[in-house]
Amino acid sequence: MTSPMTRFLLCALLLTALSCRSRTDESEGTVILSVSDFDGLPVAVSVNLGPFQIEELTLSNLPKSPTGQTGELQTIEMRSYEVTYRRLDRGTRTPPPLVEVLFGNVPVGGTTVYNNLPFIRSAQLAAQPLLDLGSLGRDTETGSVVIPLRVTMRFFGRTLAGDDIVSNTASFDLDVVP
């Protein structure tokens, strides 16, 4: 029979081990791709002035084990990024996702900066509900002259060792007007 103190210590050890599971366990490889900074984000855009870009976006390549050994094979070769849109009002129609090819490397422990990265292109402007907003001056679904959107981005790459890597999601809110 074990003492109450021994049982308590075993339970504490077990809980500690179980709570250590984090997002690093959910992706391949030994690094994490993170959207670490946005600069020049608009708060409102006019559909008649698009397409639209983010002035500056920084991606970071972080080792999962900060005390572990790192090497050149943990460099991430960027492949693409995806932008999705979610309505922040009662409307249900959203622009189609934007998927773009992306080139460049993010060294382990380092960053890469992308300038003028598109987040709304012609295909999104030519689809509902942005098409109605541009041609009629309002969203025909809600009658509103403003479409509030949450813009969410994810980035995809592969380490030189061959591990597929997906970034955290990064989001910002945007009002789209005629």
Image: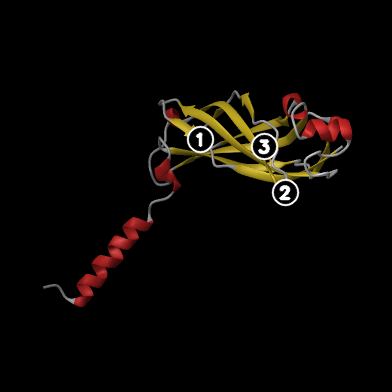
Residue at the extreme left: 1
Q: Nearer the viewer, residue 126 or 16?
A: 126
Q: Nearer the viewer, residue 81 or 110?
A: 81
Q: Looking at the rendering, which quadrant does residue 31 occupy?
A: top left
Q: Is residue 49 left or right of residue 28?
A: right
Q: Say the numbered circle drawn on residue 79.
A: none
Q: Looking at the rendering, which quadrant does residue 119 occupy?
A: top right
Specify the amino acid type for callout 1.
Val
Q: Say the numbered circle drawn on residue 57.
A: 3
Residue at the extreme bottom: 4
Q: Say the numbered circle drawn on residue 166.
A: 1
Say which of marks 3 and 1 sits in front.
1
Specify the amino acid type for callout 2.
Arg
Nearer-N-terminus badge (3/1) = 3
Q: CA distance from mark 3 to mark 1?
A: 16 Å
Specify the amino acid type for callout 3.
Leu
Q: Quick check: marks 1 and 2 in contact, CB under 8 Å?
A: no
Percent position of residue 101, x then y: 61, 23
Say which of marks 1 and 2 sits in front.
2
| Mark 1 Cα shell of 10 Å, populated few (<14), some (14-19), many (≥20) | some
Q: Is residue 152 left or right of residue 72?
A: right
* Residue under the point 76% across and 40% down: 40
* Residue under the point 28% across and 61% down: 14
Q: CA distance from mark 1 to mark 2?
A: 31 Å
Give the residue at mark 2.
90
Say which of marks 2 and 3 sits in front.
2
Percent position of residue 71, x then y: 42, 32
